[in-house]
Amino acid sequence: MAWRIHDEITHGEIDNRKAGQVEGRIWVIGSDEPIHLRLKGNCWSDLAGCYLKFRNPNPDPNGRVTLNPNQEGVVGDMTASRKVQVPTVDHETLSYLVNNNQPIPTQLGNSIYLEWFSEANGRVVVEAAHYQCEVSPPEWSMDVEEEKEQRKKNEESLQEFLQNLVNQQSLLDSTDGEDEEPLDEFQWEQLLRQSDKISDQYLEALEKYRDDPDCDRLIAEEMGWDWLIEENDLPLENPLFEFVKEATGEEIGEFDSDDDDEIGEINDEPHPLAERLHELASRLFENADERGLLESHENILLPLLTCTSAAAAQLGGALDALAADDYPDYGFMIASLKRSLTPLHQSIAAADRASKSIPEESEWIEPARKELFLIRQEILTLMDTFRKRLHG
């Protein structure tokens, strides 16, 4: 999950006039001091060598940003010419259409897209088509081949950066101690992002070395788990389980027969909201399959099907945890529900694109899009309920 802060920004600047380095300052609503960016890498060719100034004409007055004021890390994708669908109606009309689950008229336009990965907050994204932008003439430039090479370098820098984050185990250190307050939703988000990074890297290493007789040791070396390599004494269980156990206090993968029965009861009675989304995902696939659309319109429908299924899986995982615990950690619940919104929003956008691209199929795609909106609203209501319980 990324930090998306475009609504809370008032104005900012990005400076890539020195090759291999991006610096910047970003001001957010409610703060007189800017967020400082010191990043390795370069922007895309349209901003390479340039100084960019941008202003948000309509910042969210109720916005809240909790980013660290010093953002040090690596550049992701940075451009002022990303092609997106831009609404062609005013803000008031847009709000009405969204609230009433009605189609939004759009046209293709440019969007500012600033992505970076910081040591303090992980992935941060600024994406907006309504910003007012000024770009200086470039002090240096890159051609198409140089841009491809630069993007490759950015990816390599990112891999190295993420490896360092995994090795530091900074989030685990911050949760040590029995007397600390329970984690809030934002701390849980950071912890879950850290867990994602470790999971992704572990799975990549497992895929790479699974057939090697020295698989455990090679994976430990790849992950930087030097503390595991002692006299051929590697643990039998996945060290990732230990990470989760230390961070949450929960055992992973160790259940007795009573636990199995309890898990079976939980799985037999999924939360109604998760069940709704799962049934919707199944219904979408069945409709597409019965109509023979999976081959003829794969590029249009596949994002809708996969994103809806991913959202159903994440929502089910979050709400199953609620059913399993008489005293749930509401900070964890909010963070987990928030994570399910990302694929859900992607699913809504995919449904909108599919309805416009295949208007003859809108009779079943459009009701699904409206149902996705309704489920989204219920998730937001649940999150609000948990916040009230968390803060007493």
Image (cartoon, rainbow, N blue to C red):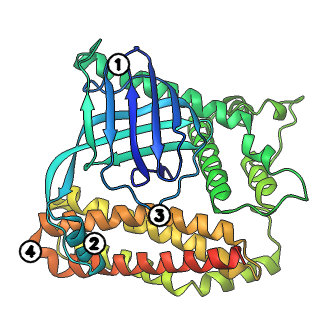
Q: Amino acid at mark 3?
A: Asn
- Which comes before the other along the chain, label 4 or label 2? 2
Callout 2 touching callout 3 (CB < 8 Å): no
Q: Is residue 316 above or below residue 26?
A: below
Disc 2 residue type (three-letter):
Ser
Q: Earlier in the sequence, mark 4 or mark 3?
A: 3
Q: CA distance from mark 2 to mark 1?
A: 42 Å
Please give left or right for residue 56 compared with residue 342 in the image: left
Which numbered disc, 4 or 2, marks the residue closer to the eye? 2
Q: Residue furthest top?
A: 140
Packing grade of label 4 (10 A; few <14, some 14-19, many >=20) is few
Which residue corresponds to mark 1? 149
Give, as a three-letter code, the residue at label 4. Answer: Glu
Would residue 246 be found to the left or right of residue 197 on screen?
right
Q: Residue furthest left?
A: 360
Name the residue carrying label 2.
95
Query: Which is nearer the N-term, disc 2 or disc 3?
Result: 3
Tell whether 139 sits left or right of 322. Answer: left
Q: Nearer the viewer, mark 2 or mark 1?
A: 2
Instruction: Find disc 3 in the rendering and name its residue.
Output: 62
Query: Which is more toward the observer, 161 or 105?
Result: 105
Quadrant in which the C terminus appears: bottom right
